[in-house]
Image (tube, grey):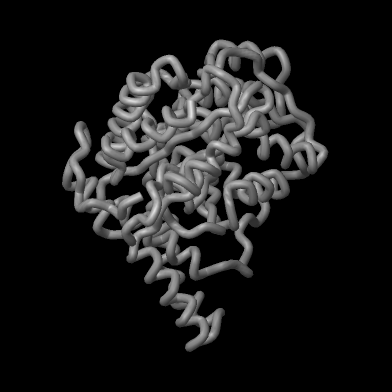
Amino acid sequence: MAPDAPDAPTSDLSPDLSSAWRRTRPPRTTLHLDSAAAGRSSWAVLDATAQHARREAERGGYVAAQEVSDLLDATRRHVLDLLGWAEGIVAFVHSAEDAWRQVLLGWPGDLPVTVAHARGEYGPNLTVLRRLGIGTSEVAGPHRLDPAAFEASLAANRPDLLHLTWLGSHVGTVQPVAEVAALARAAGVPVVVDAAQAFGHVDTTGATDVDVVYGTSRKWLAGPRGVGFVAVRGDLADRMGGLEQAEAHVAGRVGFATAVAEHVALGPAAVHAGLAALGSRTRRRLADELSGTWEVVEDLDEPSATVTLRPREAIDLAGLRAELIARDGIVTTYVGPERAPGEMTTPTLRVSGHLDTTDEDVDALARALLRRS
């Protein structure tokens, strides 16, 4: 595949935003449509991470960590602002999965006995619960969460906490977290939200009835891997055990701080709108170009940039994903049913570009898929 062309046009997306995203990071050597797995970090993020690692060698790791404490505190404030919270605590952890585990281990009193969740819950989140010996209660209902179903379930069988995933790993549906969380608060059930796919991607300021939100650096914010966060508010913030590990990849946290600052500087509302426009445009383009061979799973105008493709005939999707990389230089995600075992029965192909993704990129993917159909 040819290297990036300079600032190819992108309809329905601010050229300035697209150009800023592209020119501030290394040129692609693949057609990267995999932001939902790991975004492409900017030069500033890469430099900040590397410079802190060098500072550790020059000054000593603990001295260097102390020197960036104000920077990390400013990032904690940014995280709270991006959640729309006036107050709360933010802890840095190793990943979203680590965040979920630390929340459960730090739960006031003891481990929760029962956690309620939607049937489309992320498989690895359920694995964490199972390994800790925590019971689960699945709330029946459609893929897009039905607040009434949660209200009825919480009234009939009150769990110790309710876990929601704002935007799934297996399909780009933005869930009505605010509405469900409001009903849980009325029922006196604490709410923990996985925002790994949502933070930096969609508007997360509606989490006012949520008690805990956790997420990661590496996806839509395009920060370093190996960094996550947990935000806790209200009474729970005072009662929960320690969540942040002092022994950590502090250079990665500095990179995360830089990625968050870049997101704030670009304008979160503009980024969210740009990604929503990209997702809508990509779905419509692929639905048209792949008609008869592939199905677009989401509603065409779903306000996310995650696009899920399901083949109309059985094919080796894991092999196809590997072939797209090897032969076409196109990076996507193979999504197996284990991602959402309560909801998925067959694999899918996930396409997740970012602000620099162009119509030409989407057309290149469509041509590659049609050649293999």
Query: How many marks are shown on the rendered structure?
Result: 0
Residue 295 seen in render: yes
* Residue 103, horizontal then vertical, whole percent: 65, 46
Rendered position, 261 above or below 290: below
Is 164 left or right of 35, judged from the image as shown? right
Q: Is residue 347 above or below residue 66?
A: above
Q: Could you tell me if residue 191 is visible in this image?
A: no
Q: Nearer the viewer, residue 241 or 59?
A: 59
Task: Please state the horizontal and vertical placement of residue 131, each as a whole percent of the image.
Answer: 79, 42
Give the quarter of the image for residue 259: bottom left
Q: Residue furthest bottom?
A: 58
Q: Quadrant of residue 15?
A: top left
What residue is at 63 percent from the left and 47 percent from the top? 97
Question: Which residue is painted at 23% across and 53% down in the image?
Answer: 20
Residue at the spot 39% in from the left edge and 22% down from the top edge: 290
Q: Is residue 93 above or below residue 111?
A: below
Q: Is residue 354 above or below residue 297?
A: below
Q: Is residue 87 left or right of residue 213?
A: left
